[in-house]
Image (spheres, rainbow, N blue to C red):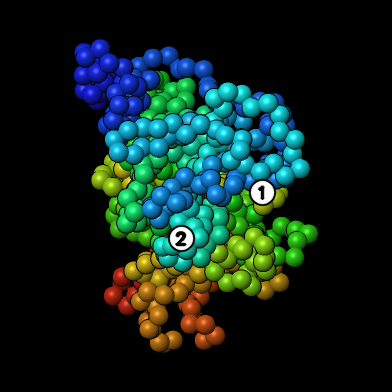
Amino acid sequence: MNALCPLVAACLLLGVSAAGAAEAGLTFEALRARAAALAAAAPAPARGEVPDWLRRLTYDDLRRISFDGRRSLWLKDGPAFAVQFLHPGFLFDRSVRVNEVSGGGVRPLPFRSDYFHYQGIEPGEIPAGMGFAGFRLMYPWAGRGRPPAEIGSFAGASYFRFLPERAAYGLSARGLAIDTAAAGPEEFPRFSEFWLERPAPDDDQVTVLALLESDRVTGAYRFRIEPGRSTTVEVRASLHFRRPVGVLGLAPLTSMFWRGEDSHSPADDFRPEVHDSDGLQLHTGRGEWIWRPLVNDRALRVATFADENPRGFGLLQRDRNFESYQDLEAAYHRRPSLWVEPVGDWGRGGVRLVEIPTGTEFDDNIVACWIPEQPPSAGSVMELQYRLHWYLDRENVPVGRVRATRSGKTAHYEPGLHRFVVDFEGGPLANLPAEAKVAPVVTVGEGASFHHASIQRNPENGTWRVAFTIRPVDPARPVELRCFIRGEQGEALTETWSHLWPR
C-alpha cells in the first residue's frame, strides 16, 4: 500500500492540511489522513511537557490529587456515560490533549486545576496548555439515573484497561508494542490526542478516537466501547510506518504473574497465589485450543506460537476461588480475563508470550501479542481490526479446559524423574463416568524422555487428572511439554496443555 492515502492526497490538492480536515469534521477517515501526513514528515518533538514538581510526586502524592466528580463531562447532559480526567504527575510525565466531538464539531477540553482537589499537596505552577494525563470512563452499572462507576481508562503511553460488571482492575491492553523483549531498546508509542464522541441519551456504546505517535510509526485508532457482563471494545487501527520495525506487537496485552499453584520459590507472604492472569489461551486458525500456564522463572522467557489467521488469544484469570488468593484488598479472584478476537484474516505470524522475572506483584511482567510474519517496512501502511472482550465468566471453550497445573520431584519413589499433574474439567468431560475409555496424550520435547502417564476421574470435584513423569536427559535444556485427553473415537476431549519446563 502507498504511504500517502487518497484522502491525504485530496487534502493536499485542495490546499488544506490533513490536520485541518480532521478538525473540520472529525471521522476515523480524517484521523487516518492526519496519521498518514504525520508519517510522511519527520517526527516532531514530544509534546505535553509536565513540570518538574509534578514529575517529582510519589505514587501516594498523586493519589491525593482527586478529580471533582461534579465536573464530569456529560454527567448532567443526558448520556448514560460520563468522563473524568486524570492529573499528570509521578510516572505520567507527558500530558495528552482531549477533545469532545458533538454535532459535527470538535471542542477542545483544556486542563483546569479547579477540576481537582489537592489534598495535602501544594500546587505549583501549571504551564499554559498543559493537558491531562488521560481520562476514565464512567457508566451506571446499577441502571440509568444511578451514580456512575468507573468502567475503564486511558492513561500512560498507549495503555488502556476496562472492567466488566463486578470486576476489579487487573491486566491492561496497549495500542501497539514495538521491539518488546527484542535485542534493542523497546519503543513505546503513545496516544497523544483523544476525541470523545458525545453519545446520545439512549446509547449503550461510546466511541473514542485516538492519535498514536512514535519515532517509527503513527496511527489512527477508533474504540467502540460497550460495557456489560462482558465489556467489549471494538478496535480499528490504521498504522503508518516511517521506518522499518523489527518486532511489531499487535493487540498487545500486559499483565502480572508473581506466584501460582505451581510456584516453588519461597515467599514471605501469607497468600498462596498472586497474579492478575494465570495463563495464555490460544484458539488457532486450525481450530485447536491451547492453554499455556504462566511462569515467573529466574530468566526472561520468550515463546512464539506460530499460526495463520488466528481465531483468538488472551490472558485469562481462570481461578475464581478466593481461597486461592486470600487477599481482600487486591481481590485477585475478581481480576478480569481479556480475549482478543481478530476481525478478518491476519495472515501468517504467531502469538508471542514474554515472561519477565519479577520479585514483587507490582511489575507488569507478562506480555502477549500477535507478531506478523512479515515486519513492516518504511512507507508501509497496515489496517487492523479486532475486538477485545473483558470478562469474568464468559469463557465458552467447547472442549475440556485446564483447571490447574502442579509439578515436583518424586525422588523418594521415582528417583531421577520429575512428575507433572494436570487437572482438566468441563466440556465433554463433565458427563463421563469414571470407567470411560479415555487416554492421556503426552508429548515430550528434546531434553527429556517420557516415562509413564496415568489418568483418573477425581471423585471429590469431578475433574480428570493426568499425571505423568519424565526423565531429564540434558540438564541445561528447557523441555517443551504438551498434554491433552483423547476420547474413545480418537477425538480431542480437551484443550492442549502446553508448558515449557524451565529446569
Whether 50 is drawn above or below 300: the answer is: above
Residue for badge 1 = 362
* Mark 1 residue crowding within 10 angstroms, few (<14) / some (14–19) / many (20+): few
Query: Residue 316: horizontal and vertical position, in percent?
Result: 48, 58
Of residues 9 and 445, the one drawn nearer to the viewer in this rendering: 9
Give the numbered dot on residue 140: 2
In the displayed structure, would residue 390 be above or below residue 455?
Answer: above
Q: What amino acid type should be assigned to the residue bearing mark 2? A: Pro
Element at badge 1?
Answer: loop
Q: Which sits in the foreground, 354 or 110?
A: 110
Label 1 is placed on what type of residue? Phe
The residue shown at (75%, 35%) is 122
Q: Earlier in the sequence, mark 1 or mark 2?
A: 2
Q: Position of residue 192 (x, y in %)?
A: 47, 30
Q: Observer-nearest residue: 433 or 372?
A: 372
Characterize the local packing of mark 2: few (<14), some (14-19) or many (20 or more) Cα atoms within 10 angstroms: some
**Residue 259 seen in render:** yes
> Is 336 displayed left or right of 221 in the figure?
right
In which quadrant will I find the N terminus? top left
Q: Residue 232: tell me if it is visible.
A: no
Query: In the image, 268: left or right of 367?
Result: right
Q: Which residue occupies 44% across, 31% down? A: 108
